[in-house]
Image (cartoon, grey):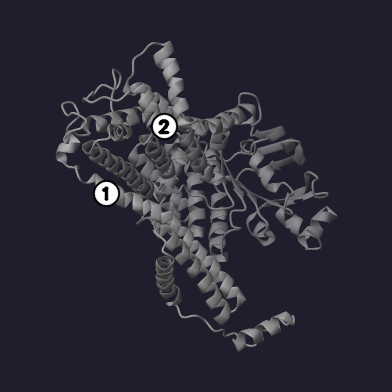
Amino acid sequence: MSLMTDRRAVSDGGSPLPVSLKQPRLPRWTPPVFALVAAGAGYGIGQAAGLDSTVQCALIAGAVFVLGTFALAAGVEGARQAKDRLATSLVWLAFLIAVVPLASLLWETVARGTKVLDGYFLSHSMGTTPDALPGGGIYHAIIGTLEQVGLATLIAAPLGLLTAIYLVEYGRGKLARVVTFFVDVMTGIPSIVAGLFILSVWILILGFGPSGFAGAMALAILMMPVVVRSTEEMLKLVPNELREASLALGVPKWRTILKVVLPTSIGGITTGVMLAIARITGETAPVLLLVWGAKTINNNPFQDAQQSLPLYVFQQWQQGSDASYDRAWAAALVLIAFVMILNLVARGIARWKAPKTGR
Amino acid sequence: MAKRIDVSGLSAYYGSHKAIDDISMTVEPRSVTAFIGPSGCGKSTFLRTLNRMHEVTPSGRVEGKVMLDDENLYGSGVDPVAVRRTIGMVFQRPNPFPTMSIFDNVAAGLRLNGSYKKSELKDIVERSLKGANLWNEVKDRLNKPGSGLSGGQQQRLCIARAIAVEPQVLLMDEPCSALDPISTLAIEDLIGELKERFTIVIVTHNMQQAARVSDRTAFFNLAAVGQPGKLIEIDETERIFSNPSVQATEDYISGRFG
């Protein structure tokens, strides 16, 4: 304590020289131990005050931890280190607040979803199963999701890729600005509006029936701006020197883009497309409007209603029976796993295709 | 093989800003011509106008004539792609293609311009790497990525890549400024060998280097910041460094300004 006041007196006096380069430091185990103490304090205070909610207890523990480490560090280590500890503990707290819901969501889905998730569930449709009874499965929904998302990707990925190439490599002046503006606008389109747009054009005006393809078109509208944006960023990361090196060899511009720019950025582009796929896989609203949902297997995405995983979850939840709740959780788990696998594949491709240093 | 370059009345712009003003000079075949001058005087811009790389920059624009023997590079109907195949370029920072192996880097210019037989490519790659004095260092790891080489090796790889397409002229934009003295020496020796086959133009900030490698030297200067750069004089290197005809050249070379 005396050391601290000494040093403060020195620095207040305007002298730049500290008395010594050595400063008292808290031992390294202080923060974790103090976290335990704070957790205990939060629990204790909660018990004493008769609080029911664990959230309240956790908030008290968090406040105790942040203020406690600050006070402790201010007392032992000095003002600058105390501020450092304050920032560090706030970052940790923010991290916990972000991770806890995620972990709890995963835990809940796994715990409830594995109840009916088995080979039968994955390989059968709801064709002969009444909604209120156990049994049935999601085979028709998996087929539907794969086909709709696949078709949407076939439409949106090439269009998005070409748009991004135009914007980065060729786009100058007014047209490029207009395209960028509309891509920005498209990014903000609510999924239900995309669904209504296709509904009015495809089903109401042109008179087609509901189909997986109609849903895929709406999903493509949602996917395209995401692909354009991510691809644009990746292409901008390619150093201009590489383009110039290729052009200076007498390689035409289109070949430079195809053979030098795209291979250099293919890892990032693939990741972007995969993430866009992951984003549209969970869309429910356009599917509800355009694909309608079905209880039986329909392998043809161009005719008649289909099912999809998010829509299946929604419909099973609507049924309201215990059996359908179980099925909804299991389907949600499959959906999460599907998106997670896509992300892992994307990371794998990005690592595999990344330019190698080769030391 | 090597060709003469005849520049007359050449001005280059970035948008409305004039970067170089009314330059006329002759670059002799099978010789090394060095461009020296203070930063921002337009040496690199001028170099880039010689193979139509200037117009790759958005808003880049050129006026005037560049004759390669008896063909105007800026004449109507001239394909900039064909110009760049004839006049190769080596950049300030080594820039091998990161996705390609050493072999593919050297073969890039040929492969991206048409189909070649594997055996044919092999010969050309070996010849080019030998020409760039890099063959002995990389012959056992031609399939490794080019970005794994050291800076000096990467620059020689870029030179090999440039000479693999057999250009008539080789433009070098400060090829040694990012390299250590030993790699610099290797590249200067290489320039001495390459001038037997190519016309070489080199931009350099290092006046000793200009004196060492070049046959003729051009001195560029600008009146003030924001003013376009001008060619002050071009002459035999020996004369420029011993007895230049313009006072500004002598001041610059002896370090009295710039």
At mark 2, the secondary structure is helix
| Position in image of residue A150 (x %, y %) | 33, 30
Give the crowd class for mark 1: few <14, some 14-19, many >=20 residues within 10 Å.
some
Q: Nearer the viewer, residue A10 or A176?
A: A10
Asked if residue A235 lies left or right of residue A12, the reply is left
Which residue appears at 69% of the width and 34% of the height?
A: B61
Label 2: chain letter: A
Which residue appears at 83% of the width and 55% of the height?
A: B248
Q: Is residue A237 visible?
A: yes
Q: What residue type is disc 2 on?
A: Ala
| Position in image of residue B158 (x %, y %) | 50, 50
Label 1: chain letter: A
Asked if residue A323 lies left or right of residue A169, the reply is left
Asked if residue A235 lies left or right of residue A286, the reply is right
User: Which corner quadrant of the image does residue A219 belong to?
Assistant: top left
Q: Is residue B166 visible?
A: no
- Residue B92 versus residue B7 in the image, above or below: below
| Position in image of residue A276 (x %, y %) | 41, 37
User: Which corner quadrant of the image does residue A4 belong to?
Assistant: bottom right
Q: Nearer the viewer, residue A2 or B92?
A: A2
In which quadrant is the N terminus of chain B drawn?
Answer: top right
Between discs 1 and 2, the one toward the N terminus: 1
Which residue appears at 20% of the width and 34% of the height?
A: A137
Q: What residue type is disc 1 on?
A: Val
- Residue B34 versus residue B79 in the image, above or below: below
**Residue A110: mark:** 1
Q: From the viewer's perspective, is the residue at label 1 or at label 2 nearer?
A: 1
Q: Nearer the viewer, residue A317 or A154?
A: A317
Residue found farthest to the right: B247
- Residue A311 versus residue B250 in the image, above or below: above
